[in-house]
Image: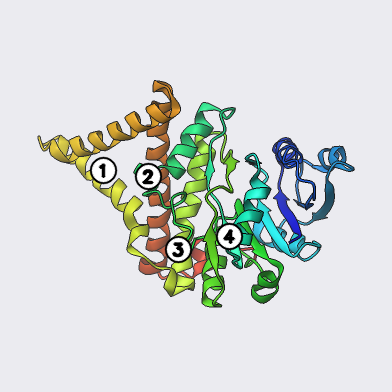
Amino acid sequence: MNFSIIIPVFDRPDELEELLQSIVDQGNLNKPEVVVVEDGSALSSAKVVKKFEGVLNIKYLEKENSGPGLSRNYGMSRAKGDYFIILDSDCLLSDHYLDEVAKGLEMRYTDAFGGPDEAHPSFTLIQKAISYAMTSFLSTGGLRNSESEKKKFQLRSFNMGISKETFIKTKGFAAQRFGEDIEFTNRLWSAGLTTQFLPKALVYHKRRTSWDKFFKQVYNFGAARPVLGAMYPKMKGLTYWFPSLFIILFIIAVLILVFGYHLPFFLFLLYFALVFLDASLKGKGVMQGLASVFAVFIQFFGYGLGFLTSVIKLRILGKSTKETFPAMFND
């Protein structure tokens, strides 16, 4: 099996350099092809890629900005491998990542795969807190990292792979800037193609570097979900309402606290206390626990607000999907 690693990059040359070094550090005898797609960046990664020529089998492609989905398609259509590994530029590969992918696909071949993510010890306090919020059982129900390899796995574009045949059959990602991996997975399943979770194919995902960038990211995630549900009815689900219900109930709990009703607010305090204790133990520090509580609150509030905003625009104001969330689309 010949792998091609596809990496879209937008204004992140420093992070790309760290990712490429982690690929070098894999130490595989059969080096994979690496395809870097510069998605109309103002900060070019050309000099970074140049450093790795001769060390990696690397190809550098430039194009106008279209978002990560179409950039991945651009790279896959020009790659030579028969199986594509898709990574975000803000990731680092764990030791033996490529070996684990190869082993997993040899044991059970599927048309696509996904893997887990966590924070690297070198990450900042904020990055570790955000990673906790996005991967912890207490904040996500463990959906991102604990799926059984025997079940269908919802692909996440920062750490996934698809076969060349799958790319040809599905034509890759749709022309949208948010939720493109969710849309792609459901289209893949509808075509009868298979996915799996490879628990040892771990990446360290930096995600966002500040609270405002994290809020904007989760807001966009939430805003995209009702639009995807309107476009593809099978993608609707009650669980996607949970963050919105969380912030509504939290606001109610704060308001009725004034009238002496303490129990609802106490339950929220109990929940955040559990998050604090869990994150403090896992992060080995009180500051990590406090930061993780803040990250979880931003996650719920940002996603829930984005979700409600799109629901109101779609269902109450009667706007079209593109009018509801124009930033999601390329045209």
Tell which circle, 3 or 2, labels the residue nearer the N-terminal end.
2
Residue 145 is situated, as x and y percent measured from the top left of the image, at 47, 49
Type of the residue with mark 4: Phe
Residue furthest front in the image: 107
What residue sits right under mark 2 in the picture?
A: 137
| Of marks 1 and 2, the one in the foreground | 2
* Residue at 65%, 71% in the rendered image: 166
Query: From the viewer's perspective, is 317 left or right of 21?
Result: left
- The residue at which mark 3 appears reads as 151
Contact between marks 3 and 2 (CB within 8 A): the answer is no
Q: Earlier in the sequence, mark 4 or mark 1?
A: 4
Pointer 4 and pointer 1: residues touching (CB < 8 Å)?
Answer: no
Residue 251 — which label? 1
Q: Secondary structure at mark 4?
A: strand
Local crowd size for mark 4, using a 10 Å CA cut-off: few (<14), some (14–19), many (≥20): many
Closer to the camera in the image, 94 or 327: 94
